[in-house]
Image (cartoon, rainbow, N blue to C red):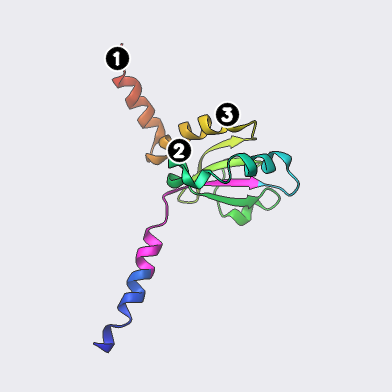
Amino acid sequence: MHRLTWIVPLLTVLFVSTAAPALELVMFRRAGCSWCAAWDREIGPIYPKTEVGRRAPVRFANTERPSEAKVALKSPVRYSPTFVVVQDNRELARIEGYPGQDFFWARLERLVPEAATKDGAQSRARQTAEAPR
């Protein structure tokens, strides 16, 4: 019985590591960014409580050291904030800037469902083909 005591911690580690979210939102920001502060006030407290926030948890990165985020970006991050939808540490889509709550939610909710499929373009093409005429 004592020989099997190591299996519970091992299974816990394996379960936790495989339960990581498939998608995440990486917010690239810089110190003193007023638009980042606005996002922190308006969106930050409620983001993890939303459906999109549960599907793509937020992680923060510095615009001055984007390589520390360990994300394969499609292009350099030039604006603060820049929100990058990431799957398996690869950029799928991005929102540059934060012009307010309405724009942010509308844009993000369009990007995250597409990113949830392995190929958002195929999903869009399939929806277009199935649309009634």
Q: Which kind of residue does numbered mark 2 sit on?
A: Val
* Label 3 or label 2, whichever comes before in sequence order: 3
> How many C-alpha atoms fall within 10 Å of the one at disc 3: few (<14), some, or many (≥20)?
few
The x, y position of residue 119, in whole percent, is 39, 37
Residue at the (74%, 49%) spot, across then down: 31
The residue type indicated by label 1 comes to: Pro
Residue visible at 42% across and 35% down? Answer: 114
Q: Is residue 80 visible?
A: no
The Cα–Cα distance between marks 3 and 2, rounded to whole angstroms, is 14 Å
Mark 2 lies on residue: 112
Q: Quadrant of residue 121?
A: top left
Check if residue 41 falls in the magenta segment: no
Say the numbered circle drawn on residue 103: 3
**Residue matched to label 1:** 132
Residue 39 in the image: x percent, y percent?
63, 40
Q: Earlier in the sequence, mark 1 or mark 2?
A: 2
Q: Are marks 3 and 2 in contact (CB under 8 Å)?
A: no
Q: Is residue 20 left or right of residue 74?
A: left
Q: Amino acid at mark 3?
A: Phe
Q: Which residues are magenta?
A: 13-28
Q: Work out which residue is located at the far left of the displayed protein and give it.
A: 1
Q: Is residue 98 in view?
A: yes
Residue at 35% in and 74% down: 10
Residue most extreme to the right: 32
Q: Where is the C terminus found, in terms of image quarters?
A: top left
Question: Callout 3: helix, strand or loop?
Answer: helix
Mark 1 vs 3, N-terminal side:
3
- Name the element at disc 2: helix
